[in-house]
Image (cartoon, rainbow, N blue to C red):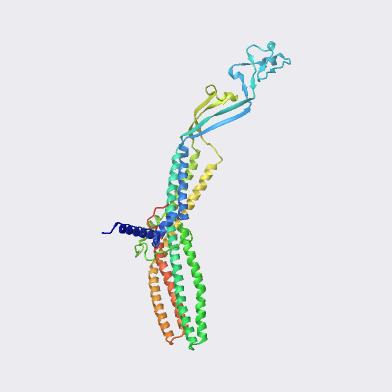
């Protein structure tokens, strides 16, 4: 058994080993296409904009419900004014009638408080002024409320239209998510292809450098021709600008993918090209009737149809503004003529409760004209939807043919690369053995590079055509709810 000192030493070594393992950063797993798409849908600016559109429409739906709730407001007023008042409406007799009948120059005095005084000898005891007009201060505050009681279907129409528009917006966002998935695929394979293109050019540079070194070594030993060496050097130098441009393109593609995924532009990327999104092969398109039904289920087509219905609902709502509206009103507050009366709530309280009916009878056809404009927009949108449906059928046929051709193109490009690699290897051996021409070797090198570039493009097009076909059929690349 280990002693206590040995046990302490063993535990210390184990602790140091754990700390060392924690200090060494774990190698991040390569990023797959599906992971890139999910990260884009969660963090990209495009996805966040779609989320904000959803938030905005939630507020629009809340606005549609606004007329169902009471509108409550507080008020406070202060001012000074005057308005005439006929005292005879309260049963008082007018003193100025008697004064006029005397035919004299009787003057009616006005006291400081604004009241009128008629001399006693010309005014009956129960007579008074016909109209008084007293300037005075007015102070008031309180709360008033209006509640719609019956709108003759306007509220229901507004809510129904808002729900249709909500469905249209959801369909539009779903289509935007599908297009964002395809955009991510383009950016992902753009980064993959640009990195592979850079690697291809670097391999070509390495082979060409070996050829130049071989020729220069032979020339120094007295074999070969100077012109052949210079020709090889020229071919080598012409590759360097291509490599620099390829390096620039690879860096730009990496930054573009990072931007789309919501990452910092300078984040490193290790892309997994071996893992693919499973896409079931499609042997043939369905018949015309099923194809038309499939196109009708596409989110963008559904969105346009729902938007047309929403516009028709908006036009109907405008026409309903000509119907009457029944509402209840209520107000309670304080009315005072002096500031110190504002606190005398019981003595100076004013209130009002009632029901009001508002019925627009004629507005110069303003609402009717607006409704007709929106109805015209709805008909135009319906015609546009028909155009889009026909265009979608044409697009689907073309994308399917491209999908069929992509398999053949990939197979042909892979065979071309294999043949070019074999030809380059044979010519390189012959040239080093002194049997071949440098021009043949350079031509083989260029053919190999072009074949490798071709297979890169074919691999991307193979994946891209399958993804575009799914999108044309109204499907996404992964199962993901719209933001």
Q: Nearer the viewer, residue 381 or 86?
A: 86
Query: Looking at the image, is 335 positioned above or below residue 25?
Result: above
Q: Residue 343 at what x, y percent from top left?
A: 55, 24
Which quadrant of the view contains residue 12? bottom left
Q: How many marks?
A: 0
Q: Residue 111 at what x, y percent from top left?
A: 68, 18
Q: Nearer the viewer, residue 433 or 398?
A: 433
Query: Looking at the image, is 94 positioned above or below residue 136?
Result: above
Which quadrant of the view contains residue 82? top right
Q: Nearer the viewer, residue 186 or 203?
A: 203
- Classify the position of the N terminus by image quarter: bottom left
For residue 462, side relative to residue 1 (left or right): right
**In percent of the image, x 57 and y 28: which residue is there?**
140
Which quadrant of the view contains residue 91? top right
On the question of residue 370 being in view, the answer is yes
Q: Nearer the viewer, residue 42 or 84?
A: 42
Of all residues shown, which one is farthest toward the bottom?
222
Q: Residue 453 at what x, y percent from top left?
A: 44, 72
Of all residues shown, which one is farthest toward the right?
105
Q: Residue 333 at what x, y percent from top left?
A: 53, 27
On the question of residue 300 being in view, the answer is no
Query: Looking at the image, is 131 positioned above or below residue 71?
Result: above
**In percent of the image, x 50 and y 78: which residue is there?**
236
Of all residues shown, which one is farthest toward the left?
1
For residue 362, side relative to residue 295 (left or right): right
């Amino acid at each position: 058994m280990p002693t206590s000192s040995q046990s302490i030493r063993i535990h210390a070594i184990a602790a140091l080993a754990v700390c060392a393992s924690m200090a060494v950063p774990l190698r991040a797993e390569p990023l797959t296409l599906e992971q890139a798409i999910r990260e884009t849908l969660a963090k990209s600016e495009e996805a966040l904009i779609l989320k904000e559109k959803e938030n905005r429409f939630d507020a629009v739906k809340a606005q549609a419900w606004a007329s169902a709730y009471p509108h409550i407001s507080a008020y406070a007023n202060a001012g000074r004014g005057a308005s005439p008042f006929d005292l005879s409406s309260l049963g008082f007799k007018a003193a100025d009638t008697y004064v006029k009948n005397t035919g004299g120059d009787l003057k009616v005095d006005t006291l400081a408080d604004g009241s009128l005084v008629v001399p006693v000898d010309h005014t009956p005891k129960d007579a008074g002024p016909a109209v008084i007009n007293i300037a005075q201060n007015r102070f008031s505050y309180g709360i008033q409320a209006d509640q719609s009681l019956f709108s003759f279907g306007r509220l229901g129409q507004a809510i129904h239209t808002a729900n249709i528009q909500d469905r249209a917006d959801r369909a539009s966002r779903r289509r935007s998510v599908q297009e964002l998935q395809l955009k991510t695929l383009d950016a992902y394979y753009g980064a993959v292809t640009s990195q592979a293109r850079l690697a291809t050019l670097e391999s070509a540079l390495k082979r060409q450098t070996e050829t130049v070194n071989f020729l220069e070594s032979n020339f120094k030993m007295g074999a070969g021709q100077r012109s052949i060496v210079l020709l090889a050097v020229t071919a080598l130098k012409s590759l360097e600008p291509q490599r620099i441009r390829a390096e620039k393109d690879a860096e730009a593609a990496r930054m573009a993918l990072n931007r789309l995924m919501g990452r910092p532009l300078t984040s490193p990327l290790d892309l997994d090209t071996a893992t693919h999104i499973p896409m079931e092969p499609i042997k043939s398109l369905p018949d015309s009737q099923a194809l038309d039904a499939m196109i009708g289920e596409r989110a963008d087509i559904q969105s346009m149809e729902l938007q047309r219905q929403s516009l028709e609902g908006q036009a109907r709502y405008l026409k309903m503004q000509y119907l009457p509206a029944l509402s209840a009103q209520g107000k309670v507050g304080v009315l005072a003529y002096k500031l110190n009366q504002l606190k005398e709530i019981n003595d100076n309280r004013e209130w009002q409760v009632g029901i009001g009916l508002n019925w627009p009878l004629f507005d110069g056809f303003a609402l009717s004209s607006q409704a007709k404009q929106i109805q015209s927009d709805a008909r135009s949108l319906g015609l546009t939807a028909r155009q889009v449906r026909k265009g979608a059928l044409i697009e689907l046929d073309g994308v399917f043919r491209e999908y069929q051709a992509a398999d053949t193109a990939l197979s042909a490009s892979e065979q071309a690369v294999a043949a070019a690699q074999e030809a380059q290897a044979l010519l390189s051996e012959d040239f080093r053995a002194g049997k071949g021409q440098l021009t043949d070797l350079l031509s083989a090198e260029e053919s190999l590079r072009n074949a490798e570039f071709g297979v890169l493009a074919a691999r991307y097009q193979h994946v891209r055509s399958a993804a575009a076909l799914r999108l044309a059929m109204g499907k996404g690349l992964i199962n993901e709810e719209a933001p």
